[in-house]
Amino acid sequence: MTSKTKDLTALFHETLKDIYFAEKQILRALPKMAKAAQTDALRQAFEHHRDETQGQIERLEQVFELLGKSPRGKACDAIVGIIDEGKEIMEDFSDTEALDPGLLAAAQAVEHYEISRYGTLKTWATQLGLPDAAKLLDATLQEEMKTDKLLTQLALQSVNRKAA
Amino acid sequence: MTSKTKDLTALFHETLKDIYFAEKQILRALPKMAKAAQTDALRQAFEHHRDETQGQIERLEQVFELLGKSPRGKACDAIVGIIDEGKEIMEDFSDTEALDPGLLAAAQAVEHYEISRYGTLKTWATQLGLPDAAKLLDATLQEEMKTDKLLTQLALQSVNRKAA
């Protein structure tokens, strides 16, 4: 392993630990968000994404294995901050008409964090000559982008419904 | 103002304060990232985005004005966490080949946070019957998406250059 490869492998591994921690936090937050949601469509979206997140965690465990490492998380201040902001909205806007829009906003901030991380990790896996890892990371990236689009649709539907 | 509109206006205002604080943090972080960057292309991208961020802050001030509010930020744990992770990478990978990839990853996490926030704010501005605000927010959203694409290109170029 050249020193170049060694440095990027270390950064790849650190970022993998970051998103592994993040996914586990998201897995715990989603049932609370589903419970708080006021519309069936939003609740179902959160429930579906909770199941998807479980599969994404398993894919990350496969990537750790491809690296020859044990799956381990590392506290990620970014996702903790994003989820805390979502909790604050749930408290401040509970029982108001702004609760679902607020939950959608929080969920989209989470999705975009994941989109950036999986995009980066996929690029690095390719650079490091780990095509199987890149494939696993891309599968999750596609799911996250699909979820973000669905949430955008729900947000726009909510706008149109209220305008009607 | 109906209670529905009142709630969403309050949430819009809170989220505006959140991104206003975030942009000011980003404005302070970008010169440090530019200074740390190892390639000219990345340094220039950060310097250009620093100037762009200044204009985005001014647009936010116009949106506050359209709401009849004074521009004011509110501590945003999410952006603080994202920027702190970037700082950690700058320290841990300084003088290594992984520094620029790490800076790119940090910058893309910032961009995606902003993309999610401006997308949400634009939708809400439309819903609240504030087309001028929606237009300002959309102008920034387009800039953030363009910056994210540029950063992706730089990340892929770096992959190809090293593979060559």
Image (spheres, coloured by chain):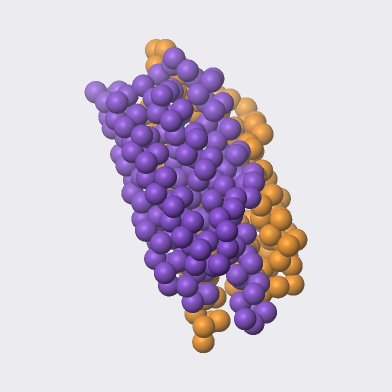
Chain colours: A orange, B purple
> In the figure, is residue A28 to the left or right of A161?
right
The image shows residue A79, relative to residue A34, as above or below, that is above
Count all numbered tags in the image, as a single digit.
0
Residue at 53 percent of width and 20 percent of height:
B91
Quarter the C terminus of chain B occupies: top left
In this orientation, does residue B6 appear? yes
In the displayed structure, would residue A122 be above or below residue B5? above
- Residue at point 69%, 53% (across, down): A29
Residue in the foreground of this view, choosing between A104 and A130: A104
Task: Compare residues A63 and A35 and report the one nearer the observer.
Answer: A35
Which is nearer the eye, B91 or A144? B91
In terms of image quadrants, where is residue B158?
Answer: top left
Image location of residue B83, percent across then percent down: 55, 36
The quadrant holding residue A88 is bottom right
Q: Position of residue B111 (x, y in %)?
A: 45, 45
On screen, A69 above or below A114?
Answer: above
Q: Would residue A122 be seen by someone viewing this image from the given angle?
A: no
Q: Residue furthest left?
A: B164
Q: Is residue B147 left or right of residue A67?
A: left
Q: Is residue A32 above or below residue A57?
A: below
The N terminus of chain B: image quadrant: bottom right
Q: Residue at x 54, y 67 (%)?
A: B67
Q: Position of residue B2 (x, y in %)?
A: 64, 82
Q: Residue at x 54, y 40 (%)?
A: B25
Q: Tell me where residue A21 appears, x and y as whole percent.
A: 64, 38
